[in-house]
Image: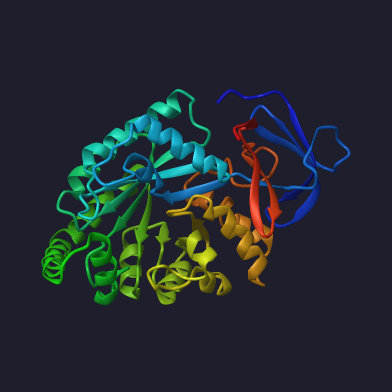
């Protein structure tokens, strides 16, 4: 990105790692170079908050732009541009775009289309057409027969920085209760009881056959090649023990407080969904993110399926949970995910860090994103 000349933002409420101060920020050559009082001459922020640019580790929202309806495909470059505009307008300046690896029968997209989207992301980044900084997160459905084959097709893409290991078979992880599995899949795929029984039996067989070998192979490759590893929907202490043994870095959407606590205690970063925080509960009936926040075992928030929920959840937590200050809540969507993603150059307002910033004003409790800077350049 082309860096701009010096910019001074003054009369701002600046959310630092551990405090909120009123003052000014000096940006130069894409970096934060100084944080001081508001006596400097510059662009008046009118008392609005300035927070670090948000860092999003898991969003499959790009697929909604590429495949907005069954059997409908949008131009992949246009899809990436639309997705990028939406995440940037939500205050997200760094995004790990999730691409599925392994055929999932609830979606009509295959591995070839994931490669098309990966190429569109790469092209957009190379041409400096994107507002946010984009990386790739491979969502590996380890129970799918073709998971390892499709992972191999993308594993050397230089934008791949994160891989998650997931298994959506019945009686597993997110769907430990078959009743919950039935409600979700029968409702979404409109299957009869007989079709659901056949579908479930096939998914169970595939999980028993492929999940173990695929998890082991993908985890070994990621450990050897510096790709961050996440384990998805861990529900039991056994799941956590397996994750620890495989070198997992992030516990992504643990479904029980026991699994979340064990992951946190073992040094894994516990990631939960921002929509869970905003709604006050999980849409699948699993543990509430607010419960984990109150227990001190929530490390990262992800927007998951609603990009704007990330900034909304940060201000919600800072206001609704007594033990969490606004700086603490903001760290969950900035510094902590940046650290977990191996990006130590961003995620906080400090001298020397990237000038990825968001200007925010609250309106009836909702954070309104007014301006976004990435590397000191205004993008929104």
Foreground pick, 86 / 145: 86
Tell whether 228 sits left or right of 242.
right
The mark total stands at 0
The picture places residue 100, in percent across and down from the top left corner, at 29, 47
Measured along the vertical axis of the image, is residue 53 above or below residue 300? above
Occupied quadrant, residue 356 = top right
Point out residue 357 in the picture as x, y percentages from the top left corner: 64, 41
Q: Is residue 210 visible?
A: yes
The image quarter in which residue 120 lies: top left
Farthest right residue? 39
Q: Is residue 226 something that shows in the picture?
A: no
Q: Position of residue 369 (x, y in %)?
A: 63, 45
Q: In x, y percent, where is residue 311?
A: 58, 53
Q: Is residue 281 left or right of residue 5?
A: left
Write the residue at 52% across / 74% down. 291
Q: Residue at x 22, y 47 (%)?
A: 108
- Residue 38 lies, with reference to residue 256, above or below; the image says above
- In this view, the residue in front, 274 or 160, is 274
Quadrant containing the C terminus is top right
**Which residue: 35% across, 72% down?**
235
């Amino acid at each position: 990105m082309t860096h701009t000349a010096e910019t001074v933002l003054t009369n701002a409420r600046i959310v630092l790692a551990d405090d909120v101060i009123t003052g000014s920020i000096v940006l130069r050559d894409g970096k934060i170079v100084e944080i001081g009082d508001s006596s400097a001459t510059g662009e008046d922020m009118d008392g609005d908050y300035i927070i670090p640019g948000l860092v999003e580790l898991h969003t499959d929202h790009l697929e909604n732009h590429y495949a907005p309806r069954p059997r409908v495909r949008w131009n992949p470059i246009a899809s990436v541009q639309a997705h990028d505009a939406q995440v940037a307008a939500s205050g997200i300046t760094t995004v790990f775009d999730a691409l599925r690896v392994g055929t999932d029968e609830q979606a009509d997209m295959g591995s070839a289309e994931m490669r098309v989207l990966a190429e569109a992301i790469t092209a957009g980044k190379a041409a400096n057409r994107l507002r946010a900084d984009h990386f790739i997160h491979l969502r590996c459905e380890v129970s799918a027969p073709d998971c390892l084959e499709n992972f191999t097709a993308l594993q050397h893409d230089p934008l791949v920085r994160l891989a998650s290991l997931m298994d959506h078979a019945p009686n597993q992880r997110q769907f430990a209760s078959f009743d919950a599995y039935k409600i979700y899949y029968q409702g979404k795929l409109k299957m009869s009881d007989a079709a659901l029984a056949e579908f479930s039996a096939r998914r169970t067989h595939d999980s028993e056959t492929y999940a173990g070998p695929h998890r082991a192979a993908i985890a070994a490759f990621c450990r050897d090649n510096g790709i961050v590893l996440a384990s998805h929907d861990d529900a039991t202490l056994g799941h956590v023990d397996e994750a620890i043994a495989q070198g997992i870095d992030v516990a992504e959407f643990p479904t029980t407080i026991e699994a979340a606590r064990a992951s946190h205690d073992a040094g894994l970063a516990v990631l939960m969904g921002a929509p869970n925080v905003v709604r006050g509960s999980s849409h699948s009936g699993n543990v509430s993110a607010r419960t984990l926040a109150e227990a001190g075992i929530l490390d990262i928030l992800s927007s998951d399926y609603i990009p704007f929920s990330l900034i909304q959840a940060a201000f919600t937590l800072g206001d609704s949970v007594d033990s969490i200050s606004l700086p603490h809540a903001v760290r969950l969507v900035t510094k902590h995910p940046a650290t977990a993603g191996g990006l130590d150059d961003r995620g906080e307002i400090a001298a020397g860090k990237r000038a990825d910033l968001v200007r925010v004003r609250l309106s009836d409790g909702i954070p309104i994103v007014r301006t976004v800077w990435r590397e000191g350049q205004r993008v929104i």
